[in-house]
Amino acid sequence: MRSSTRTSAIALAFAIVSPSLLFAQAAKAPAKPATAAAKPAAKSKEPLVEFEMMTWPEVKAAMEGGKTTALFYTGGTEQRGPQNVNGGHTLMGKETVKAIALRLGNAIAMPVLPYTPNNASKDLPGTIGLTPEILSTILERLSEQAIQTGFKNVVLMGDHGGGQPAAYKVVADKLEAKYAPQGIHVFFCDEVYAKAQGDFDKWLKDNGFPVSSHAGIPDTSEMLYLGGQAWTREELIKTAVGDTLPRGATRDPNVPRVNNGISGDARKSSRELGKKAFDNKVDYAVRQIKTFIPN
């Protein structure tokens, strides 16, 4: 045992002082076969547009180069049925606001707020929410911080319906009145949520798909498209059906409720539909923001 231990110690010491030996041995070792989990090749480099992924000199340079619009996009932490992760609003929000900033070319995507108006539930433990009043205070503070940083335009928008338009529009109107005389403007972009969602619901109905209001085809498809299995448990989509009332309809008290977090039928969700929903949101936002800030 002593001889073996002494030999091992000598070998280790030699390897430490002679790392070239390790490299030589590694070169002789057979290459491991590639696995299916290998990451795809990196995409071509995109312009930096995410505030939290930039250094302060990069932010300063971007603003001096014309990126003087700050995009505040709110997400949310909310149960999204058995098939979708609770951070769906925030995860989709990050992808959406980044895409909007890239398309606009003169904007920076600010960090997405992960909490919006909602209420927690013991039965469906996936939701953590704020009140509209708290959200209004946060949006006002963040907007004024962006203005103090040097941004000339601030755009408020969100992925979750809670607080819209009460918090967003009220704050935007208040700050617009305060800062417009200084050539600084604050806007509420509502079409990324209300109009994009309403028009996509109409498209689904016209094409024979069931319409839903929460955790149905739009939510599930977009999360599946953007995040795959990490965001959506794809094997559960085939049973992803809950209350199937049309948006705004009155519930029949004699019909038992399916209390699984889904308001609709998500079973026909697909990546293709998710891409369409995502592209709609980005298109609607870019078009509306360009009416606010033409240049």
Image: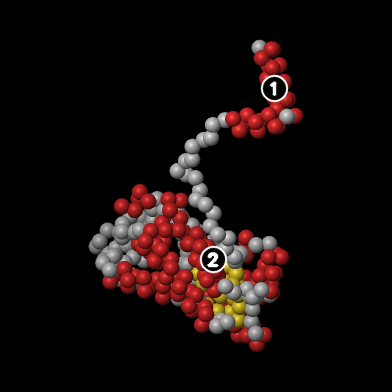
Instruction: Give, as a three-letter code, the residue at label 1.
Output: Ala
Question: Disc 2 and disc 1: Cα gap in Å?
Answer: 53 Å
Q: Kindly identify the residue that appears in the image at 34 percent across and 59 percent down.
A: 269
Indicate left or right for 271 with 172 as reference.
left
- Using the image, tell me which numbered label, if any, was put on residue 98: 2
Q: Quadrant of residue 255?
A: bottom left
| Residue 272 seen from this side | yes
Q: Secondary structure at mark 1?
A: helix
- Residue 22, percent from left and from top: 66, 30
Instruction: Give, as a three-letter code, the residue at label 2.
Output: Lys
- Residue that label 1 marks: 11
Pointer 2 or 1: first along the chain:
1
Is 100 above or below relative to 29? Answer: below
Binning the other alpha carbons within 10 Å of mark 2 as few (below 14), some (14 to 19) or many (20 upward) gives: many
Q: Secondary structure at mark 2?
A: helix
- Residue 256, percent from left and from top: 27, 58
Colour scheme in use: secondary structure
Q: Kindly identify the residue that appears in the image at 41 percent across and 63 percent down.
A: 275
Q: Nearer the viewer, residue 228 or 244?
A: 228
In the image as oriented, which residue stretches furthest toward the bottom? 181
